[in-house]
Amino acid sequence: MTDSSEKPFLRVLDGEALSPPPVWLMRQAGRYLPEYREIRAKFPTFLDFCYAPKAASEATLQPIRRFGFDAAILFSDILVVPDALGQKVSFEVNEGPRLEPILSEKEFGRLNEAIDLKRLAPVFETIERVRAALPATTALIGFCGAPWTVASYMIAGRGTPDQAPARLFAYREPELFQRLIDRLIEASVDYLARQIESGVEAVQIFDSWAGVLPAGEYERWCLAPIKQIVAGVRRRHKDAQVIGFPKGIGPRLDDFAAQTGIDALGLDSAVDPLWAAQNIPNAKALQGNLDPLALLAGGAALEAGAARILKAFRGRPHIFNLGHGVAQPTPLAHVEALMRLVRGHGAS
Ligand code: CP3
């Protein structure tokens, strides 16, 4: 996609092991940053903010300016896809997302046949603005939610502790659920391809709820759709770099890495870095996996957690990250301390 030689993040996706490893954090733009809270306050709703290219590009760049991460991630949300499929989506302050739930064929029938990329034009403009403003050594990551995770919000209409509504729906109405997943596969391919055309240099697929699925359901609703998205994106952009983040799938990670065709595997915090280093072939870069709560706690917990990860992945392609998003009350000083720990590592 781009000449990767200047960008450590892209060099690692290409299979190089760097010491110190490149670093970025999931949810690195967000409410723990005072400058983020300042822009956020100017918008009545979160979606208005996501669809305002000037503000969204600023939010994307804020954590780069403050901490000097090796990659920026597009500021947006996975739920812009249901929005662009015609479902009503909103975000209630301190309560999370609300969608008009899909309960039957009737609500499914109201969705657009294909994703409305015109509605997402502000997102593509955000990407162009960020690419023009980023330092030469910083990469830009785009993303989408995986079909299972996005569908679970579309069915429940909100966040739930275990995605029980979508799991039940998939058992009771497997054919209708398959049609929803297929719609999301096509939408995700169109969306990611356009993000790449607008300037992102890698894409991450977030399957934040993969871990609640039993084996058979995991294969059908997590593995197969992501495999199809990777193939679909590569048909349009053969060198596309794809990171998969199937949160919570534990020992299925090696199978996931082998089957889906992803370039890099995002690890959640429950994965033992030594297990991953031994069981995932070197050809796949690994990304992760400090516990966001160790970063929130700081001190000895942060130092021990970071040291264990740096040691386990030394000598293999690794991108330092958290195992999930930055927790809201995380002190800025802890992120600065983490950057010193990572950047001070190795230099060999
Ligand atoms: O990582 C980044 O900095 C880029 C932006 C990004 C956001 N959401 C911004 C956001 C990304 C990559 C996401 C992904 C996302 N969104 C996921 C997958 C990753 C994960 O965290 O598991 C999911 C499940 C969502 C859905 C979502 N969006 C929820 C459940 C919520 C509310 C809960 C919360 O943490 O506030 C959101 C809102 C949201 N998305 C915010 C941000 C910064 C907070 C909104 C605000 O500032 O009011």
Image (spheres, grey):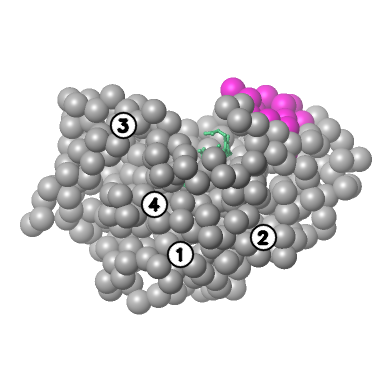
**Residue at 20% in and 58% down:** 18
Name the residue carrying label 3: 331
Mark 3 surroundings within 10 Å by alpha-carbon count, few (fewer than 14), some (14 through 19), many (20 or more): some
> Above or below — where is 174 with respect to 131?
above
| Residue 161 drawn in magenta | yes
Q: Position of residue 85 (x, y in %)?
A: 76, 52
Name the residue carrying label 1: 130
Q: Which residues are magenta?
A: 154-169
Mark 2 residue type: Leu
Mark 3 residue type: Pro
User: Residue 69 — which label?
Assistant: none
Name the residue carrying label 2: 120
Residue nearest the viewer, comparing 278 with 284: 284
Q: Position of residue 152 (x, y in %)?
A: 67, 36
Q: CA distance from mark 1 to mark 4?
A: 11 Å
> Above or below — where is 272 with respect to 188?
above
Residues under numbered marks 4 and 2 in contact, where contact means CB atoms less than 8 Å apart: no
Badge 1 or badge 2: first in the primary sequence: 2
| Label 1 C-beta lies within 8 Å of the nearest ligand 1 atom | no
For the N terminus, the image quarter is bottom left
**Residue at 28% in and 73% down:** 5
Residues under numbered marks 2 and 3 in contact, where contact means CB atoms less than 8 Å apart: no
Q: CA distance from mark 2 to mark 3?
A: 33 Å
